Image (tube, rainbow, N blue to C red):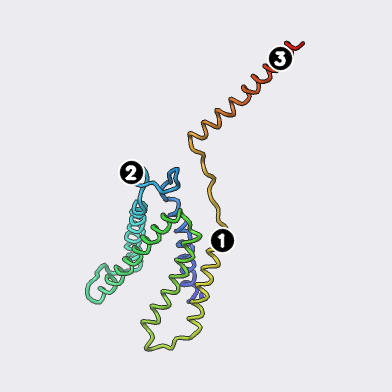
């Protein structure tokens, strides 16, 4: 098997999971009132309420799954000495991931769950930031190709094109209870009113005859 195939497959898996992350968390958006504004606690909730269970999912999958896979791979459970780098950089990466998840959750909550706007910015921006960080770290030992900056510009253009042209759909709005009841009553009353007018017309005709 090609050695590059495994990282490519896992990278595709990351794109698939993270691509579904935005639309999924958008379903946890707080309801909106009659004025269209998001409901605040206690009737509604803040973006941090679903964020708690995002952390729980990380806890279950990362810690339990990580420990299980360490056991399978024969890793030691020490994080001191030469192994301290795994704790230091792993915790820093986890912190960045948690802060990113917090920002993404807040973006989704405050944009009415508009993943079509948020997610292209997230993925296009992440690629660009990764490239910039790599340039800053390796600028003394590598020569940066001008094509990199062209690629960043094309990424930005692509994000704008995707965000502006992705089909947007909205769930049908439910009528307010008061208006629904009034409309139903009006529809029931309409035939009765027609009958009264009809009967009055019949009486008038009989009187004329």
Depth check, front residue: 181 or 49: 181
| Badge number at residue 204 | 3
Query: Badge 2 is on which residue?
Result: 42
Using the image, determine if residue 191 lies above or below residue 157. above
Single out the mark in the foreground, 2 or 3: 3
Depth check, front residue: 205 or 104: 205
Quarter where residue 143 is shown? bottom left
Quarter where residue 190 is shown? top right
Compute the Cα span from label 3 to label 1.
Answer: 63 Å
- Tell me which label, 3 or 1, sits earlier in the chain: 1
Single out the mark in the foreground, 3 or 1: 3
- Tell me which label, 2 or 3, sits earlier in the chain: 2
Q: Position of residue 177 (x, y in %)?
A: 48, 35
Q: Are marks 1 and 2 in contact (CB under 8 Å)?
A: no
User: Which residue is most to the left?
Assistant: 81
Helix, strand or loop under label 1: loop
Query: Badge 1 is on which residue?
Result: 166
Using the image, determine if residue 191 lies above or below residue 86. above
Depth check, front residue: 175 or 118: 175
Residue at 26% across / 67% down in the picture? 77
Compute the Cα span from label 1 to label 2.
Answer: 35 Å
Q: Position of residue 197 (x, y in %)?
A: 66, 20
Using the image, determine if residue 143 lies above or below residue 170. below
């Amino acid at each position: 098997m090609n050695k590059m195939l495994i990282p490519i497959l896992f990278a595709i898996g990351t794109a698939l999971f993270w691509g579904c992350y935005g639309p999924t968390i958008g379903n946890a958006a707080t309801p909106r009132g009659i004025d269209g504004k998001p409901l605040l606690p206690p009737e509604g909730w803040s973006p941090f309420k679903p964020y708690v269970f995002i952390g729980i999912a990380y806890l279950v999958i990362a810690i339990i799954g990580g420990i299980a896979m360490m056991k399978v791979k024969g890793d030691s459970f020490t994080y001191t000495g030469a192994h301290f780098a795994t704790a230091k950089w792993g915790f820093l990466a986890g912190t960045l991931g948690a802060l990113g998840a917090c920002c993404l959750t807040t973006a989704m909550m405050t944009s009415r769950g508009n993943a079509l706007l948020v997610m292209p910015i997230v993925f296009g921006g992440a690629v660009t930031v990764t490239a910039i960080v790599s340039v800053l770290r390796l600028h003394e030992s590598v020569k940066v190709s001008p094509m990199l900056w062209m690629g960043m510009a094309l990424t930005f253009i692509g994000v704008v094109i995707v965000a502006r042209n992705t089909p947007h759909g909205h769930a049908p709005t439910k009528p307010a209870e008061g208006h629904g009841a009034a409309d139903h009553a009006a529809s029931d009353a309409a035939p009765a009113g027609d009958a009264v007018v009809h009967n009055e017309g019949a009486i008038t005709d009989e009187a004329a005859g």
